[in-house]
Amino acid sequence: MIVPGMHFDMKGYRIGYGKGYYDRYMVRFAGISAGICYSSELKPFLYHGKYDRHVDIVVTDKRIKTCNK
């Protein structure tokens, strides 16, 4: 599943669009999730809450980052 986001961090958490739709869907999703962004939008750390879900892979224009669970 491709998950949109404005920014992602090194653990795969993201700043999305504020409604929690993808976080709720990812609870039931059994496949691999990937976030796509420019390398300038990949941050070392983003604040996340207990209901936020991370993606498995973040793909940028310069690298592919596998995120730890």
Image (spheres, helix red, strand yellow):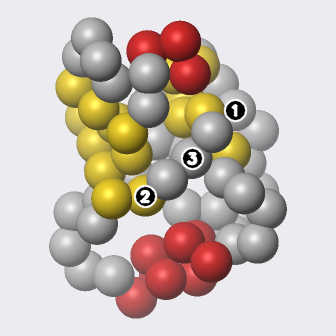
Q: Position of residue 31 (x, y in %)?
A: 20, 73
Q: In the rendered image, which quarter is residue 20 located in?
A: bottom right
Q: Amino acid at mark 2?
A: Val
Residue at (43, 15) in percent of width and height:
39
Q: In the rendered image, which quarter is residue 51 located in?
A: bottom right
Question: What separation in Å lies between label 1 and label 2 (alpha carbons)?
Answer: 16 Å
Question: What separation in Å lies between label 2 and label 3 (alpha carbons)?
Answer: 7 Å
Q: Amino acid at mark 1?
A: Leu
Residue 14 sits above or below residue 51 on the image: above
- Confirm or deny contact between disc 2 and disc 3 (CB under 8 A): yes
Q: Position of residue 10 (x, y in %)?
A: 47, 27
Q: In the shown orientation, is residue 17 left or right of residue 25?
A: right
Which residue, given by chain and number where applicable, does mark 2 sit on? 3
SS type, badge 1? loop
- Confirm or deny contact between disc 1 and disc 2 (CB under 8 A): no
SS type, badge 3? loop
Q: Residues within 10 Å of mark 2 (few under 14, many from 20)?
A: some
Q: In the shown orientation, is residue 26 left or right of residue 43?
A: left
- Confirm or deny contact between disc 3 and disc 1 (CB under 8 A): no
Residue at (45, 75) in percent of width and height:
26
Residue 42 sits above or below residue 11 on the image: above
Q: Residues within 10 Å of mark 1 (few under 14, many from 20)?
A: some
Asked if residue 38 shows in the view, the reply is yes
Mark drawn on residue 5: 3
Residue at (68, 45) in percent of width and height:
15
Residue 8 sits above or below residue 34 on the image: above
Q: Specify which label sits upstream in the sequence, 3 or 1.
A: 3
Q: Residues within 10 Å of mark 3 (few under 14, many from 20)?
A: some
Residue 67 sits above or below residue 61 on the image: below
Asked if residue 65 shows in the view, the reply is no
Which residue, given by chain and number where applicable, does mark 1 sit on? 46
